[in-house]
Image (spheres, helix red, strand yellow):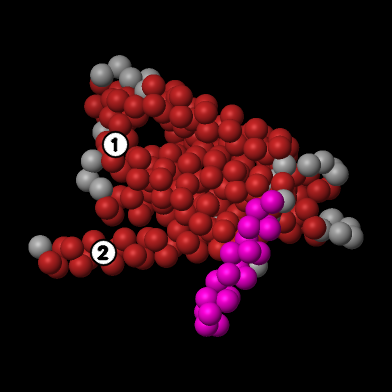
Amino acid sequence: MNTVEQLAVIASNDLWNLLQFPFMQRAIAGAMLMGILGGLLGSFVTLRQLSFFSHAVGHAALVGVTLGVLLQLNPTWMLLPFTLVFGLVVLYLIDQTDLASDSILSIVLSGALAIGVILSSLIQGYRGNLMSVLFGDILAINAIDLVLTLLVLVGSSIFLLLTLRQQILLTLNPAVAQVQGIPVQFYRYAFVVLLSFAVAIAIKAVGVLLVNAFLVIPAATAKLASDRFIRFLVMSVLIGASSSIVGMLVSGILNFASGPSIVLIQFLVFVAVFGWTKLKFKAA
């Protein structure tokens, strides 16, 4: 047996032993659920050009995190209501002003980040909770986090799939959807609620700095390889789930940080699909 084969055997044995731990099992289950959720919502985020919106919600969550640390509460429980309120307020401001949506997002995001940084300076002593949410720690998710993720995933799936025709029309042409009597505003605000919850939950896994990648990269990758909406939606979900699981396994084998490992796998898949589509186009 050569050196490469020996290293492979050692790595597989270490991974098998690691998979026996409950925290690793919870982390893989959570990664898969979050990957599915990110792929599902990310499909609509990408097509509706809401990438900056989810980015803003994720980064503004710093205020919710610091408030949780200051009040000695679980940051996750502060993240959920804060991201929800922030998302709804931003959407309301976009609807009530003549400013471009990116301008509103930049203004509110800057203000929220400034408040978050000021509040974080008031934290005395240990800041482990703050750092784990900023950079993610999927290995620390518990049964409650799994239940919350599952609830948001089930709620999102039911809402989007039962109203899929309306969602597609709203995505492609909001004006036509309005004329046909579809409650556009209700669907917009309902989607923002789901997106805000998804961002809050994913922050626990990949952190504030990388949360947007969870929603954007799988969907963008699927968009490169598909020209039909249903196929695009299914591929986005599959890429989100599979890349999350592979990222967790790579993290366990190489002892890398879990969240960045998942995002790195998603990025590599995107690069591979991009290269494949370019070669396919040239061959045609």
Q: Is residue 82 above or below residue 224?
A: above
Q: Residue at x 76, y 50 (%)?
A: 66
Bounds of the magenta segment: 1-20
* Spot occupied by residue 11 in the image (x, y as percentages of width and height): 60, 68
As for residue 8 lying within the magenta part, the answer is: yes
Quickly name the residue at label 1. 230
Quickly name the residue at label 2. 276
* Spot occupied by residue 210 in the image (x, y as percentages of width and height): 56, 57
* Spot occupied by residue 172 in the image (x, y as percentages of width and height): 27, 36
Dot 1, crowdedness within 10 Å: few (<14), some or many (≥20)?
A: few
* Residue 284 falls left or right of residue 193: left
Dot 2, crowdedness within 10 Å: few (<14), some or many (≥20)?
A: some
Q: Residue at x 60, y 36 (%)?
A: 149
Name the amino acid type tagged 1.
Ile
Give whichever of 60, 238 is nearer the camera.
Answer: 238
Residue at the front extreme?
Answer: 1
